[in-house]
Image: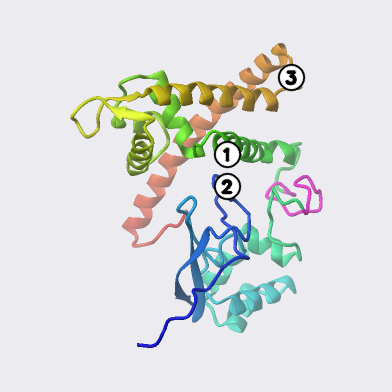
Amino acid sequence: MGKRGPKQQFTDVSCPNPECPKYCMTGEGNVVGNGTYKAGGETVRKFLCKECGRTFNSRTGTSYEGLRTETGKVDVAIDFLSRGKSIREAAEASGCSQSTVRRWANSGEIAAMRKGYPPFDPFSEKGDILDKDRPSFLDDRLPGIDMPKSLMYFPEKLAKCVRNMVSVYTWEIGLKPHQLPIIMEVGYHPHISQRDLSARLPVDKSRISMIVKELTDQGIVVNESNNKLGSLALTEKGEEMYESCKRISCETFSKIFDDFDKEEINQLEEYASRINHRIDTLSQEFSDRKDLVHRENANFGLTFHC
């Protein structure tokens, strides 16, 4: 057997996981190859981030992400659509079905490319998310309603800011961002079980088990029962981390709302409570509608994608 050459280095590829300590950082050596697969006859390379365990591919973060067609065909279809051609003409030119091209045409990323814009990234440093010229699902569709785009993008922008701040704070004390919620819950609810943790946190059970094992190996959490699901408690080291996590939470939100006085914070909390209640109501309503559509389509042998 011949001697194997050096492994390929992917120094120009960065991790797309916002919670990763090396998010968007190239040349760190944390990204390695994880094989390839074929998409419409085109080779797509898979990657693995050794820092956070996230898997992704060469199409992640691009307008072609999630598409199973080679990029050349997509480009041909977009070119035809951008010149005002019909779905049928674009499908014939690209060699794809009309339903496929129609799905691309309805995609937000593809719609942006049709209008000559770069793929939309609300957090890109190259553009302002409030740019009035950018395409938006709000444009020309809500007559008589003044809905500022800043309000629509606010939740995502706030979430990303919090993730970035927490990532830095936790990294400084030797923790990972995903460990903080578990430490906070175990500290606030001593002897809590993994089952109760999964009920309190929007995290998969297997993910919680993995994080608990990490914290146990680090000597931060201990299982005080013989049961696998256990009675979780913090060690002496864990109590110190718990105090640090509480400080992180306080510092994060005090910095974000530094320009607000107590009265404004209370008013904001009232507004947030109202919108959260409304969102819960709508979530349940549309979840029921989705289930109904699924059942109706199943009766007719149709497939519903959402």
Q: Main secondary structure of the magenta part?
A: loop
Q: Dot 2: what SS? A: loop
The reply to whether residue 165 is visible in this rendering is yes
Q: Amino acid at mark 2?
A: Pro
Q: Amino acid at mark 1?
A: Ser
- Of the image marks 3 and 1, the number of the one nearer the N terminus: 1
Q: Percent x, y for residue 293?
A: 41, 50
> In the image as oriented, which residue stretches furthest toward the left?
226
* Residue range (magenta): 126-140
Q: Percent x, y for residue 19?
A: 54, 44
> In the image as oriented, which residue stretches furthest toward the right?
132
Q: Residue at x 55, y 27 (%)?
A: 276
Q: CB under 8 Å between callouts 3 and 2?
A: no
Residue 18's disc is 2
Look at the image and tell me in which quarter the N terminus lies: bottom left
Q: Is residue 23 above or below residue 149?
A: below
Q: Nearer the viewer, mark 3 or mark 2?
A: 2
- Quarter assignment of residue 239: top left
In-image side of 46 versus 261 (left or right): left
Q: Dot 3: what SS? A: loop
Of residues 280 and 204, the one nearer the viewer is: 204
Q: Nearer the viewer, mark 3 or mark 1?
A: 1
Q: Residue at x 49, y 52 (%)?
A: 51
Q: Which residue is mark 1?
A: 167
Q: Is residue 147 above or below residue 133?
A: above
Q: CB under 8 Å between callouts 1 and 2?
A: yes
- Quarter assignment of residue 250: top right
Q: Which residue is mark 3?
A: 260
Q: Amino acid at mark 3?
A: Phe
How many C-alpha atoms fall within 10 Å of the one at disc 3: few (<14), some, or many (≥20)? Answer: few
- Of the image marks 1 and 2, the number of the one nearer the N terminus: 2
Q: Percent x, y for residue 83?
A: 75, 74
